Amino acid sequence: MQKITLPERPNWRDTAREVGFTFADMHGEPYWDESSAYRFSLRQIEDDIEEPSTDLHAMCRDAVAEIVTSQEMMERLGIPDPHRDLVADSWRRNEPEIYGRLDLAYDGKGPAKLLEYNADTPTSLYESAAFQWQWLEDQLAAGVLPDGADQFNGIHEALVERFRALFSKNTDIHFTAMADNPEDYATVEAMAWAAREAGMGAHYSDLDKLGVSKQGQFVDAEDRVIGTLFKLYPWEDLLRDDYARHIAGSGCLFLEPAWKALVSNKGILPVLWQMFEGHPNLLPAFFADDVADALVAGGRPVPAVASAFEKVADQFTRGHVVKPIFSREGAGVSIVEAGDVTEASPNTDYDQHPRIVQAYAPLPDFDGFKPIVGAWIVGDACVGMGLREDRARITQDLSRFKPHFIAD
């Protein structure tokens, strides 16, 4: 794994505007940054990213199967009591999933480590699936990249096949996101593009334009009944919305399904550690309430996790990360080293949620920037990746997107 300085395409910003990539620059800073790119070997991609990510996704599904059987675990993962049956039934009915993005710490040497899994509303889909592929083709044609260079990127093709596998041709699928958010709209449009290519009908409405009919069905801005809805709106918010009471009787299939509220939830990290303790791609993790005394007051963890915590206590003393079970773009995250908070997100929007603690995994440093790998899952397999980097150790909403290529 190397970071290689490369010449930018002369007119890439014009290209971005032409294809609707309107947020390539944000707030006077580059979001898309092709002044350099990350180079990987094929072995690194196949052995360190692709295969482990597919396994991690399967492990998360195993965890969901356990969680839905326990009211206590549903409560710990913040699922509101009135909607726990909705979440559990969604899993038992095997409601289909489309995609997700595993965020990994990886330095090109040791095993990739799972930081978290946005399995419900991951963004940066367009940049990963389309714009960085165009970058690869353009830079190959210009002779900037070595002959035979490739990219780990079958995201769009996998999405097309996923829609074809799940739905009959000409099935109408509705898509929705918050209005006036270019990044969210790009993600939804990338998904709708794949659905159209798969032969589906794709209809978009802003989230605030959706309603409920007298018959209890969800309808779009033109009062068309919604049978299948891809919503770029997180379940943790939807389940606390008044509209949630209509979901069970609406006859609407949601993408992603309600059981993804358990996967796109940092509470799954301690569950994974409990189930797969010592797995090379996991970091030790615990619910904060279970180990708070051991971390802060020099006391002991609760008996249920005492044995597991004692094995990694020294690791947590050196460094751990505190995370709300629900948060986006690093909000509410803080890094604690030797008992002191050494870095913290200024965003406190999610501070009301319970927390987990996870062993600290330092990100690699390339010229002062620290990248994370976003490994994309479509269906049940890892099919591509995108990288984001930041000078800070906590990746946030303005962290730069970096292209990558494979060359041995």
Image (cartoon, rainbow, N blue to C red):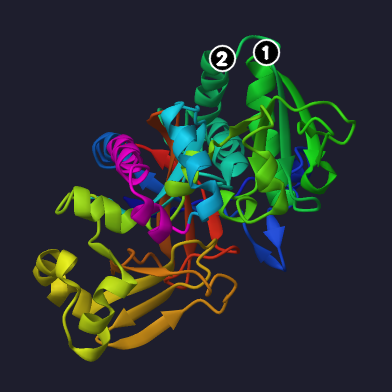
In the rendered image of this protein, does residue 334 appear above or below residue 385?
below
- Range of magenta residues: 54-78
In the rendered image of this protein, does residue 8 appear above or below residue 128?
below
Would you say residue 108 is visible in this rendering? no
Question: Three-letter amino acid code at disc 2?
Answer: Arg
Q: Which mark is residue 199?
A: 1
Q: Which residue is mark 2?
A: 164
Q: Do the CB atoms of the residues marked 2 and 1 lie less than 8 Å apart?
A: yes
In depth, the one of 266 and 361 nearer the eye is: 266
Q: Position of residue 138 (x, y in %)?
A: 59, 34
Q: Which mark is residue 365?
A: none
Question: Three-letter amino acid code at disc 1?
Answer: Gly
In the rendered image of this protein, does residue 385 appear above or below residue 286?
above
Q: Residue at x 81, y 48 (%)?
A: 208
**In the picture, residue 383 is in which quadrant?**
top left
Q: Secondary structure at mark 1?
A: loop
The stretch drawn in magenta includes residue 76 = yes
Q: Is residue 275 left or right of residue 328?
A: left
